[in-house]
Structure formats: C-alpha cells, structure tokens
Amino acid sequence: MLEQAKKYYEHGISVIPVGANKLPIGSWTQNMKELIEPKWENLNYEGVGIVCGAVSGNIEVIDIDEKYSLDGKLFDNYKKSIASVDKNLLAKLVVENTPSGGKHFIYRCKTIGRNQKLAKRPTTEEERVDNPKEKVKVLIETRGNGGFIKAYPSPNYTMLHGDFTKINEITEEERAVLFSCALEFNGVFDDVIKPNYSNRPKQDGLSPFDDYNQRGDILSVLLSEGWTLAKENSKNYFLKRAGNTTSPHSATLHKQTNVLYVFSTSTEFEAEKGYAPATVYGILKHNRDFSACAKDLLDKGYGDRITSQKPPQNANKEVSKIKLDDEDFSFLADKNKIHQYIQMVVDGTLPVGLETGLHCLDNNFRFKRANFNVIGGHDNVGKTFVIMFLLMQSARLHGWKWFVVSVENSAGSLTRMLVEFYHKTAIKHLSQSQIMDAMIFIEKHFDIVDNQNSYNYLDVLAMSEKLWNAKKIDGVFIDPYNALELDEGLLKTYGDHNYHYRVTSAFRNFTKKHDCCIYLNCHAVTEALRRTWGKDNAPDTEVIGHPMPPKKSDIEGGGKFANRADDFLIIHRYTQHKSIYRVTEIHVVKTKETETGGKNTPLSEPIKLLLADGNCNFVPYGFQEIYEEEPSATFIEKPPF
C-alpha cells in the first residue's frame, strides 16, 4: 500500500494513512494545504486516504452509497440517468468499488465545492426502530475541499474503471450533469430558503407565502421568465436558465414539494441551494422585495387578510365573546338535563365509556366521546404504536371513525400498522384478499393527514371540523404535539405559557362542541428520563436502574396539559431490559369522570400489556409466557416501535 501511496503522491495527490475505522491517523490539516511525501514505515495503518480538493489538483469525489438504496438499483439508475444526458461522460470518470457495495466517481474539475449531500431519502419505519432520531439516509454525496476518502489499495477497495494516476478533468457543464442527475434521487430538502423580511405585517390566518408554497404554480412563473423545460421524470422537472446553451439543465423542480434546487452559478439564485416557491416568485418578480411580493400575492388571492401592524388602543383589553339581551340567560346549564343526569346516577343507568377489548384495561380506561385525552411518555417507548392499536380496537368493536394527524409518521407506515392490527398478523403472512379486506375497512374508518406538509393547531382544528361535518368522525389523534408548528403571532402576543393553555383549551372545547374525542400524544422532558428506579422505590427488583415512568408534570409544556385533560395516560416500556422489553405499561394518572368508567392506577400497579402475534396484537401480560432465551416464532427480536 505504501508504494501505491507514493505513486499517488508523485502524480499530485495528497495522501494520508487511515485506520480501520476510516479515520485518518494523526493530524492531516497540513495535508489539506500541501503535498507531503508519505513516510509511513513506522505507522500502524490499514488503508490509504486521498485528500480531495485544491491540494490534489481539484479532485472531487461522488460517493454513491448503495447500501441505503431501497431497491438495490441506485448505482445502475444513476448511471442510466447520466448516460441519457451525456453518453460519453461515464468513460471519463475513475470508478472504484467500496467494501459496502457502494461506488466512488473520481474526477478533477476547474470548479469544485466543499462536501455536500446531493440525494437523501427519509428513513423507513424499520430503520427508525434502531435509531428513532435518524430521519434521513444519504444516498449520494460529494467529497471536495476539506474532505477525503479511503481508497484503493485499502482492503476490500477495488478499481472498477480507470486509475488514480490518470484522473481526467471534466468541464463545469459535465460536473453539472453529474450533480443534476444525482438530484433526481433526492427526496429530502432540509435547508429550503423561505421569504423573510423585517417589515412583515401581522398576519391573521394563512400567510400569502405559505399559501403560495402550497398551491402556487411556480413552474409557469419560471417558464415565463425565460427558463425552459429540458426534461422531466416522475420526481422532478429539469430546467435550463435563460441563455444556457451548453449544460443540459441548470436546476431541478421537485414535483411533490415544489422546491427549486439550483446548481448553476449563473442565475439569480445562489448555487446548490433549495428555494421555496414563494421565494422564487419574490426573486423573479420583485427582485427580492418581499414586502411588495406579499402584497402582490394577496392581491392575487393567496393567504388570508392582513391586519394593521399597529394594534388598536384596546388591544390588551379583554372583550366578552357573547352578546346578551336583558332577558337572555341562555348561558346557564339546562336544569332538566342536570336532573336527568342525577337520576341516572341514582338509578345506576348512567352510560359508561365503551370497552377497549382488553378487560385488564377496561377497569381503568374507556373509550369516551367528548373526552380530551393526553398521552405522555418517554421517546421511543411505542406511544404511537399503542394508540394506533387502541384506535383499531375502537373501530372494530364500536365502528368509530378517526382522523389521524401524525406528522412524524407516513400514511403508509400507519396504514401498515392498522392492516396488521386488523388481522393480528404480520402483513407478509397475509394474502392479497386479506390485505384488501383490511384496506376497505381502514379506508372507511380512518383518514390520515398528508405529513409532507406542516400544520399548526388551528390547521388541525380546521381539518378536523371539515371531516366532522363530512363524516361525523368520532375521534382525532394528534401525534405528537411538539411536531405541530407554533403560531408565531399568537405565541408573541400571549407568551409561551398562555399560548399552550389556549391550544389545549381549544382542543378541549372542540371535543365538547362535537361530542368527538381527541387523543394528544406528548413527549416527556429530557430531565424525566434521567430518573431511574432505585433499590428503595422500585416496584420490582428487575427494573432497578431503568428509567422511571414520567409524571404528568414531566410532559413538555408542563402541568397545563394535565389541567386541561379529561383523562391522562402515561405509556412506558423498559426498552433496554433483556426480558421484559415487550411489555408495555399504561399508567392512568387522571380520570375526570369515574362515574362513566375508569379510574387511576397505583404507581406500582400499572396495566401491563404484552406484544404478541408477531407484534400485531396486545394481550394482558401473563396471558403468554415471556421467552428470555429463545423467543417464540410469533415474536421478533425487538418490537417495531
């Protein structure tokens, strides 16, 4: 390897020794500035690293990570895309295989950049089981100035085409082809540039920018400004800037998100950035004057009305919402209904909440209309999974219809849960007809929000109102609360504490107005996770050292959620316990009306449910045996939380 490293050095490539973990051995700062002859005879190294960027004659590398390709065809499809634009370009690249099955494209170019991610995809549900916080997988990225790669002749690296001592220089237009073709596989846009200006007036409702981002036709605007459509596929439009006669395209417009990603340096936009539609409109039509842009969009019917920046003199004065005549006492509760309620309590005929299908749970918790239920717990204990199971139970047993607002889970993954809960069988073991039966039932009883967009609490209430009017839904599941966008105007006006009180009050008022329950999923604060069971307070010796279930007051936002809730559940699971990690605890910590069913559970005696039937059903703990050493075939190693 040392001889090969010296050969690279002789051909103007900065090289560094690399360990087995792909990290350089020692400092390599100087290697980014100048060529240093490799004298590694006394070093314990396991591979050769190549420093990219100007020091190596403007070497840039495109890293294709095949192991994250869902269909295993990323490299082949990328090659086909490049060849469809320039059939001679691939032959100019040096290509090597990496140990994980990926590929490196190596070239030199007059213009290169720093390391950047060209194509990403959202993680799958299965991938989030092991790492719930990982939201994306990088499919294609570059290594340029400030970067390096481990390379041949390091162990398990092999040359597929060309030689590092004969790296071709490609043109800027050819580099643009490589980048634009890589962007075809991108499905995640992180740093999208949105309109921003300091003199923004107070907005009542949807802003013209947000509205235009959702339904504006930015493709037509680009075409009207001299851009041309070079080609399109299922995901992107490929556009050429006005006057571009050399490169095949200058930008991509993602069809689903309407994000414009520009990689040409000769446009009104900053290269290698993503732009929201309203930003594109403001740049092209108003030369970045976003005050004028907002007015223009409002005049065209985008967004809701704008109020004056100056609040009225009585802005801080609370005004009654009701107007009463002298003889109007309609605000008083109906006395006849009060008497009827009392008589039903005396007679024992007061309707109780509906059964959950789990006798161990029915004693403490029931399905109740007009209830605002808050569910709390630590991250990654399976709150969403458990609640989706209960929603299916209510639909199958009582015909309830649900609106599911799950911002962090795709409609596909949620529907898969419901299919498996419906049959209590893993989807891979179901026939096509069984899947269709489940889908027909689910489409009748569940509506799931499109989580490609973001929503605030007013959006959720508006959508819920519309579905209630159309279908008389029985419940709304909001998952989780902290994924909802904050209404910045209300937050500024009322402050953080009062803002969340207004939100929870609005949710509770909705349930009473429509006789429709809301389940609100909330995370616990990080501090609560640090509290573990000790020898003196543990309900059982097997949980000593494991995180305690959080309290009502531990929920992000504090006690206001418990104050507004009718019923409050804590869902807990010992995720790192070797034998009881399949057992879910449900702590009922608030029951507003015990007369209609339900009661709080003692801290040391929660309801315990066991994940069974291939992780597609919950049964009372103790109903089946927990297998510590050799799990039953109906269990997988870890539940899909």
Image: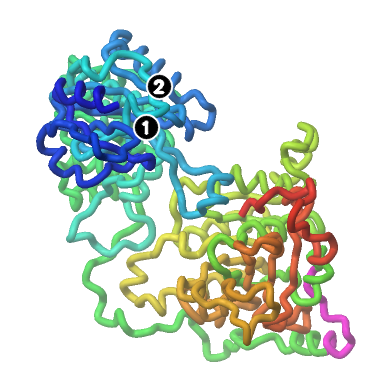
The part of the chain drawn in magenta is 343-354
Q: Check residue 324 for magenta coloring.
A: no
Kind of residue at disc 2: Tyr
Residue drawn at (42%, 37%), measured in percent from left and top?
187
Q: Nearer the viewer, residue 398 or 25?
A: 25
Between 523 and 549, the one lying in front of the other is 549
Between disc 1 and disc 2, whose residue precedes?
2
| Residue 607 falls in image quadrant | bottom right
**Could you tell me which secondary element the residue under label 1 belongs to?**
strand
- Farthest front residue in view: 42
Q: Is residue 349 magenta?
A: yes
Disc 1/disc 2 C-alpha distance (Å)? 10 Å
What residue would you read off at disc 2? 78
In the image, residue 207 sits, relative to residue 537, either above or below, namely above
Q: Secondary structure at mark 2?
A: helix
Residue in the picture at 65% in, 67% down: 517
Q: Residue tagged by mark 1? A: 140
Left or right of 435? Residue 24 is: left
Q: Is residue 476 above or below residue 114?
A: below
The single residue placed furthest to the right in the displayed view is 347
How packed is label 1: few (under 14 Cα within 10 Å), some, or many (20 or more)?
many
Residue 163 vs residue 428, the one in the foreground:
163
Picture coordinates of residue 376, whole percent (x, y): 58, 70
Residue 80 falls left or right of residue 34:
right
Three-letter amino acid code at the position of disc 1: Ile
- At which x and y percent is residue 14? 17, 31
Whether label 1 touches label 2, CB < 8 Å? yes
